[in-house]
Every structure is written in C-alpha cells, then in structure tokens.
Amino acid sequence: MQEGKESVATNHSAVVFSAAGNSSLSELLSQQFNVFFCSSMDEIDSVADDTAVVLVDAVASETDTIQELCKQAVSQLADDDVPVLIYTSSKTSLNTLSIFDAGVADILDDSMDPEDLLARVSKSVFHTIANRQLKSRLQQANEMAFSAMSDTSDLGVNIQFLIHCHECDNLDELGMLLFRTLTHYQLNCSLQIRSQFDTKNMEPNGLAKDLEARLLWELKDNGRYVDFGRRCVMNYGQLSLLVKNMPADGKRFGTIKDNVFPLLQGADARVKSIDNAGLLVMERDLMKGMSAKMQSVMHQVDERYQVVMRQCAELVEDMAMRVDDSIMFLDLNEQQEATFGNIMQNGVNSINELFNQGVRIDESFRKLIDYMNQMLDSEQEASVEQLQSVLDKL
C-alpha cells in the first residue's frame, strides 16, 4: 500500500516554507515529492506550477507567530486549492481549533515517525487530488447541463421560426423574421433570397451591401457550406446565408451549422410557397384578361350574328312576299298555289325558329361568361363545388 502511495506522490511537487532559511523537512519529503524551498511567503505560489502541498516549518516559531503564518499561507494559496500543513515542535502549545479554523489541512510535529509523517502528507495530497477530480467532474456536469439547456433553447427558437415563417407573405417579412431568429445565436449575417420573380439581398437593417451580395451570388453553387476564417456561407435551395462571426470554438462552430441549417430549409420552403402564390396570381390575372377578351369578342360576334340572322329573316320574308305577288301570274291552280305557299311559310317559320335558338344559346353562353368573371374577380379561392358547377355549365 505504501508503495502505491509513493508512486503516485512522486509525480507532484511540495513547497517547504521556513522563515529561518533552512528546514529538515526538505530531505525527508524528497523521497516522495519534488521539493522546492522558499523563505518568503510571497514566493510560495510561484515556486512550482504543479504544487500539490505546502508545508510551513514553524518548529522555531512561537504560538502567535504560527497562527499568523497559517493565515498568510492559506490566504496566499486560496485560489490554487493547495493544502497547507504546519510542521511544529511537539513542545509547542497550539490552539488546534484556531489553526484548523484558519484553513490548515493538518498539523505535524517533530516527534512523529518519518514514515507516518510522509503518510500524513501523502494523504493530504490524495484528498486534494480527489477534490480536484470531483471539481473537474462537477464542472463537466455543469457544462453538459448548460449545453443541454442551450440545445433545448435552440430547438424552441427554431420551432417558433418554422411556425411563424408560414405567416410571411413576402420576401422582406421572411428575411427579417430569419434575422430576428439568428439574434438568438448572436450571429452577424447577410442574406440572399433568389425567388422566381426577384433576387433579394438583405442585411439585418433591411438594406443590402453590394460586396456581400456579389459574394453570395458567386458562392451559391459551391456546396452546402463554404468556410473561410471565421466566416461561413451556407447554401440551401433558393437561399444563401453569410455568417461573419462564426465562433472560434470548433464544437460551437459545428453546433451553429447544425442549428441554422434547418432555418434555411424552412425559409426555402416558404420562398417556394410565395413563388407558387405569385404564379397563381399571374395565372388568375391571365384568366381574367382572357375572359375579358373573350367577352369582348363574343359581344362583337353576337352583334354580327344578330345582324346576319335579321338579314336572313328579312330576305326570306321579302322572298315570300315576292312569291305571293308572282303566283297570280304563274297560272297555277288553287292546290298548287296552296302547296307553294306552305313551302314558303315553312321556310319563314324555320328561319324564325333558328333565330330564336341562336338567341337562347347566346344568352346561356353570356351567363357562363358572367359567372366566370364573378369568380375571377372574387378575392377568395373557389371551392370544389364552385369549380364543378362551372364545369357542368361548359
């Protein structure tokens, strides 16, 4: 067991302080420690960087002096988490409670067996090592906890963006929403959105910078990520984002990429939706224009049709009158005259019936055109039933 302790302790440094300028502890401690000696209290924390224990040699000191040395040594090493041990004479009367209250880890005296003394020193070192390991693990646990809290916060921010981005009706609203979300990650960014109708370059203030816009356009086809220094260009679909202050920490650098990329995916989906909505508006306007043009053409056709039909009816009636006037000179009998008159009358009636049918067809077609105009002029989308009704009328 002792050998195990020696093998562990040999890797550590011990500082021996003696105001008298010499100490018998140095030779004894050198068996297990790298020993450094100092005669000034100000030198204690600068003698060795990896100090594991400090022993204050107070064999020749008075009781009041020992308590003062304890307080100075502990105060000097308060930030280093190094145990302070007092080495005194067995004949010296000490107030143990006051010394321990000052922060001393252990009290040693010159009557102790050297092996026991080394064991007590090693024990203090092992306690210190255990406390440092526990402190390190506690710090790691805190870092993990804070990382988990940060990840949860990042996830919530991303979800809120994905929910609200579908309420954006244009590229400006979408870009500003993305910038507000990126403030959670403390990022300074430039954004380029390439829709089917326009290319929008934006900064957090809503304006555009020519250099950043040119850079984003040139790098838009160079892969998902383009890293250069602390800058990173992220490309997805119709969006490119330039981050100008990526963190120097590699882990945080990757986390930023992982968390920002879903935002670009959601924004890209919304850009496509806005483009589709714009195309639908264009198609609707086109249909309105075609309907208006069709209505104008039908109005002209209708007028010409009415004129032709009236001319046909007048022509047939005039022909019937001429035939009636000419029958008396044809030397026909009554039966022949009646037959001939019936033929002419049937022709006039047929022409009138055809005219009436044309009027009814024209009226139905006009109603259909008017109904289509009402639907196209409406700001609301047509329902399935309304569309089916239009198809039934065709």
Image (tube, grey):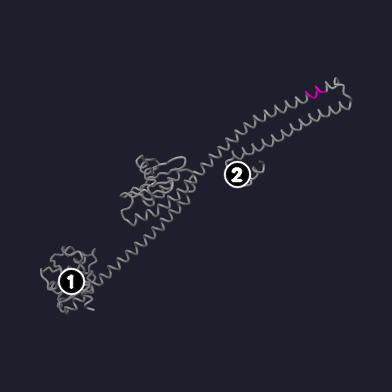
Query: In terms of depth relative to the viewer, which is nearer, 238 or 12?
Result: 238
| Disc 2 packing (10 Å; few <14; some 14–19; many ≥20) | few
Q: Amino acid at mark 2?
A: Ala
- 157 sits to left or right of 313: left
- Residue at the front extreme of this rendering: 331
Query: In terms of depth relative to the viewer, which is nearer, 144 or 171?
Result: 171
Residue 299, image quadrant: top right
Q: Quadrant of the C terminus?
A: top right
Residue 344, image quadrant: top right
Q: Which mark is residue 33?
A: 1
Q: Secondary structure at mark 2?
A: loop
Measured from the top left, where is residue 26 in percent x and y?
Answer: 13, 72
Measured from the top left, where is residue 377 in percent x and y?
Answer: 59, 38
| C-beta proximity under 8 Å, tags 1 and 2 | no
| Residue 260 in the image: above or below residue 27 | above
| Residue 31 in the image: above or below residue 211 | below
Report which residue position mark 2 lands on. Answer: 382
Measured from the top left, where is residue 332 in percent x and y?
Answer: 87, 23
Q: Which residues are magenta?
A: 318-323
Prevailing SS of the magenta stretch: helix
Measured from the top left, where is residue 78 in percent x and y?
Answer: 23, 64
Question: Mark 1 or mark 2, which has the lower sequence index?
Answer: 1
In front of the other: label 1 or label 2? Answer: 2
| Disc 1 packing (10 Å; few <14; some 14–19; many ≥20) | many
